[in-house]
Image (spheres, rainbow, N blue to C red):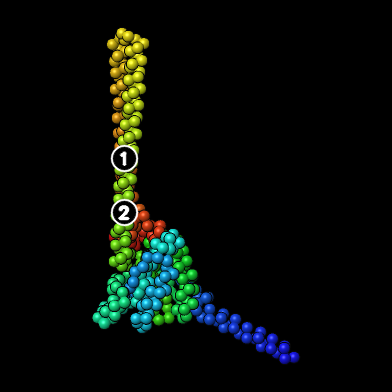
Amino acid sequence: MSDWVLLGLIAALVVLLLLTVFGFVVYSGLFTEVVVSAGSPPLGSITLAYKFRVGPYGESGQLFTDGCSISSKLCSIGVYYDNPHTVPPEKCRFAIGRILSEGDTKPSEEQIKRFQKYGFKIFSFPAPSHVVMATFPFTTPLSIHLAVNRVHPALDTYIKERKLCAHPRIEIYKEDRIYFVCPLARQGDFYVPEMKELERKSRAAAAEAEDAQTDITGADTMSETSSISMEATTDSRDTSVATSILLPFPPSRGREEADNRSEHSYSESGASGSSFEELDLEVTTDGEGAPGLLPDVGYAGNQEVTDKWTKEPIAAERGEE
């Protein structure tokens, strides 16, 4: 009889444990509905202390801990510049830190010196005019993992369906809520100096590579054009020689036809070269018109349009420009 009682107690404890775990997960936001919307941001301009990193987003946890250890009363913020689904983890760029002040309030010198002492840098973000945003409850540490796995896919779907230009991804941990904010305009204002410098170098490297490719293509084209001209000239000369051998004393008309053929060969090579130059000009003209199809993303380079979070132009942004 005592064995049955013992088994019953163990079963009851297991059930209670499972119910406790289930309640904890539900309290963390398991069944919370994720609502994505576009509109005014939940906060204004901010001044933050941050650390910038290039690497897997999983390494951001230690930076959050560093900021909390300096001041536990301030709100945490994370700014993620690259889409981890398209950019290798070791190349993802992000900034993590704490919000020192909001709006017109200025951070104290004591706060600034304290964060700078531990390697943090100070920067300010303006108040975004329009954003894509979502919120998620921040009740337990598990809420962070649930939010990352549920909110970001919802943001991706919303932005893709409406073809919006919304980046970077900004996470703000404020009281019992996590705010996910994606600016719809002036995205470059939310690039910290290190990110701006990386973008500048990336654009410069891309321009150099494009110039080098253009030089190589031009050299190959000149070589091919010269080869065609030489072959045409050789064929013409061979024809003239053969004609001379077959007709030791060709009539003047024959000589004129041979000369005309030779001149025609040169003109063909010249025409071929002109056609190629015209083709280059057409391609260049189209290329100059192409940027109109891409959004003005501040410091974002053209090669990273698919690497960063979804970037498509929107009517509101075009109007502002």
The quarter of the image holding the N terminus is bottom right
Which one is nearer the viewer's eye here, 204 or 261?
A: 204
One can see residue 38 in this view: no
Q: Residue furthest front?
A: 118
Type of amino acid at the residue the image marks with label 1: Gly
Q: Looking at the picture, does residue 162 appear above or below residue 34?
A: above
Disc sitting over residue 218 in the figure = 1
First in sequence: mark 1 vs mark 2: 2
Q: Residue furthest right?
A: 1
Q: Looking at the picture, does residue 79 appear above or below residue 225?
A: below
Q: What is the secondary structure assignment of the residue under circle 2?
A: helix
Q: Position of residue 74 (x, y in %)?
A: 35, 81
Q: Position of residue 140 (x, y in %)?
A: 47, 80
Q: Looking at the picture, does residue 199 appear above or below residue 34?
A: above
Look at 29% across and 55% down and name the residue there: 204
Look at 29% across and 62% down and name the residue there: 197
Q: What is the secondary structure assignment of the residue under circle 1?
A: helix
The residue indicated by pointer 2 is 205
One can see residue 206 in this view: yes
